[in-house]
Image (cartoon, helix red, strand yellow):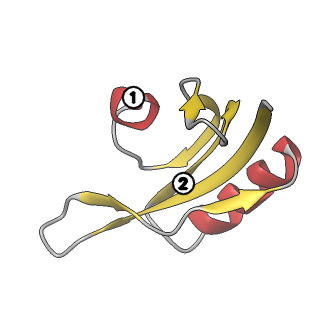
Amino acid sequence: MSATYYVALPFNRGEDGDLAAGEARECQTSAAALREAARMAATSAGAVAFSRSGDPGVGEFEDAKILRIFGETPSLDALIG
């Protein structure tokens, strides 16, 4: 059964200066993911809100769809792929 998942993902700078993903948080709606990503970006280098559709039962998912980027994040290619 296909479903759409909404996620907020923060990014922080490590000691080496590179951006690394923090702990993702699943949200109920796209609006909630946008709010959560904005909140995360206030205390980190940046964050992204995205959605992903697929069937967790068989492990098949479409590419992520970026809803909005806040602050600094890795390149879009790294986020979508």
User: On the rendered structure, is 70 left or right of 80?
Assistant: right
Q: Pick the residue in front: 67 or 5.
A: 5
**At x 84% / y 54%, what residue is drawn?**
32
Q: Is residue 50 above or below residue 13?
A: above
Q: Which residue is mark 1?
A: 81
The tag earlier along the polypeptide, 1 or 2, is 2
Between marks 1 and 2 in the image, the one whose residue lies nearer the viewer: 1
User: On the rendered structure, is 73 left or right of 59?
Assistant: left
**At x 23% / y 71%, what residue is drawn?**
14
x and y, in percent, of residue 7 in the image: 67, 51
Q: Is residue 77 above or below residue 27?
A: above
Q: At label 1, which amino acid type do we have?
A: Gly
Q: Which residue is mark 2?
A: 47
Q: Pick the residue in front: 72 or 50.
A: 50
x and y, in percent, of residue 15 in the image: 17, 76
- For label 2, the SS is strand
Q: Which mark is residue 26?
A: none
- For label 1, the SS is loop
Q: At label 2, which amino acid type do we have?
A: Ala
x and y, in percent, of residue 53 in the image: 70, 30
Q: Pick the residue in front: 8 or 12.
A: 8
Judged from this view, the residue extending furthest toward the left is: 16
x and y, in percent, of residue 39 in the image: 69, 66
**At x 61% / y 31%, what residue is drawn?**
66
User: On the rendered structure, is 14 left or right of 26?
Assistant: left
